[in-house]
Every structure is written in structure tokens, then in C-alpha cells.
Amino acid sequence: MTILIVAEQGYIEAALVERFTEHNYRFISRPLAAVPAGKAAQKFLSEQGVTLVINTALMSLAAEQLPGLLQQGPLLSLLNAVEQLQLPYIQLSSSQVFSTAESRRYKVSDLAEPDTELGQLHRRVESYTRKHVQRYILLRTGALFSERGDNVLTYLLGQFKQGGDVSLSLHGHSAPVYVDDLARVLSALVDQLSCGVDEWAVKVWGEYHYSSSDPTTYFHFAESLLAVMAQYMNTEQVNLVGVEEHDSRWQYPLLNCEKILSTFGIKQMPWRSSVVNVVKRYCKEVV
């Protein structure tokens, strides 16, 4: 088994590389732009002996690069090559494909009606995947966080370092996911797909949801981070201020994750279980 990880260099790729190395997977990692175009994509996958593809590009690209992802080029070349070779394909997507106006937990069967530009991009990539690939898994998740890179956690810790008032929304519950937990989930999918779970008379292809098990507001997420950070740095000058306005960084609708549990046995983990170690590493290694 050889896995192709399609990802930009950053915290998502790093988490997958670390996890897959620990599990002795054979893998290669490439940014989407480095995947050959046209028929050369199929040749590339064949020569590398790729047996499964995980595409995290939409979650790991910088915001200004996202529109280019949908240009008729690398993405469609990759999808067509995957289909020609009949490879299993995992596309990482986002809960932002759903409307942020409702507070319910969205099921995989619910209609995707995004009300943000990023959500619309995710929906279009999902549509391309369904159109061009038969053996696909669309894995929707929530806001990702890590001690490295640009994400909801490092943004907040950076604000805390500066001190002063930090205004955060009291509205809108999301269920953030530690990137190492996401790597655990993807690893579990790889394990079962590589064992031929799709041949066990079980319908595995389609959409799945994964998020942490404990929804929270942006304000209360920040409270938890600040409490841990205070053990390693002086945070006396930080003042959290709850505001009524919604925050775009926390616009990740809640997900119903029953399907991934019933099909693959993958259980949700609480984001709180990782916060102490993540903030500690940030304070001691990153700062």
C-alpha cells in the first residue's frame, strides 16, 4: 500500500506524516500544484505505486490560493487519474458546506446550503469529486487547530501574547478538531479501506462527518486556552471580552457523526483532552 497525501506544507501535512510514519505506512506527499496535469497524472500515480489518495488541499491552502484550486487543471487531472485507476479517494471537506443560520447537528443526508464563500468552494469540490470518482469518501470536519501554523488556536494564543482586551463571540457553537485527532481518523479509514472493507457487502463510499464531541463557543474555547497558557506565561494583562457579534473564524456548523461510528467504528474525541499538551508545546517550542 502506498498513500498519496495531497497537501500544502503545514500542520495538516505534518500531522499526517507523523501518524503514518508511526504506523509504518508507505506514503508520499505532494502539494496539489506538483501533481502532474492531464494524462501524466495517471502515469505518476502508477509509477509511484499509489493505492489510495488523501486530498487535504482545500483545508491546507492559504485563503488567497483557494479560488485557483477549482481551475480546470491539477484537481480534475487528479480526479480523472484516480478514477481511471479505480483508487480509493478521500477528500477532506468542511462543515461550512452547511448553513450557519441553524444550530442543529447536520446529518450527511442534509442538503448542503453554504452561506459563506469558503463553504461554496467546499461544496463545488465535493460536487467535482462525486462527478469524477466512484470510490470516494468525503470527510467533512470542523475548525482544525494545532500548535503550529495559522489556525483558530494559534490566532488566539498570539492575541494573548500581545495582552489587552480580546473580544470574542458568545454566540455560535462549533466543535473544533485537533489536527492529530483528524490524523487518527484518517489513519483508521486507511486501515479499513486497505483491508478491503468495501468488499464486505458494506456500502462505504459517500459522505462522512467527524468533529470533536464537545461543542463550545469561541469565547469559552478561548477561556480554556487562556487557563492553560497562564501556567507557562504571564497572562495577567489579557482580558477576554464576550461580544454578541458572530465571528467568521468560528462559523463551522455542528455535525452529526453517527455514520462514521456505525460504518467504521470511529468514535469522537473531546477537544479539551488535547488542549493542555497543545498549549504547552506552543508555549515551550513555538513561542
Image (cartoon, rainbow, N blue to C red):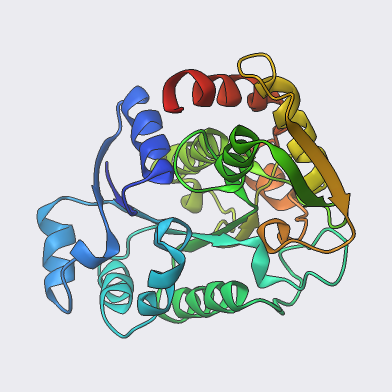
Q: Is residue 180 left or right of residue 117?
A: left
Residue at the farthest top position: 231
Asked whether 137 or 6 is in front, the reply is 6
Asked whether 270 or 48 is in front, the reply is 270
**Residue that appears at 28% across and 70% down:** 78
- On the image, the x and y values in percent for residue 246 come to 80, 63
- The part of the image, by quadrant, that contains residue 148 is top left
- On the image, the x and y values in percent for residue 96 come to 66, 66
Q: Is residue 273 left or right of residue 179?
A: right
* Numbered circles on residues, count: 0
- The part of the image, by quadrant, that contains residue 42 is bottom left
- The part of the image, by quadrant, that contains residue 60 is bottom left
Instruction: Check the image and report above or below for 143 versus 128.
Output: above
- On the image, the x and y values in percent for residue 73 come to 26, 81
Residue 215 visible here: no
Residue at the farthest bottom position: 72
**Quadrant where the N terminus is found in the figure:** top left
Asked whether 135 or 170 is in front, the reply is 170
Residue 110 visible here: yes
Instruction: Check the image and report above or below for 239 versus 284.
Output: below
Instruction: Check the image and report above or below for 233 versus 246.
Output: above
Q: Is residue 199 left or right of residue 118?
A: left
**Residue that appears at 61% across and 47% down:** 152
Instruction: Check the image and report above or below for 182 versus 31.
Output: above
**Residue that appears at 74% across and 24% down:** 236
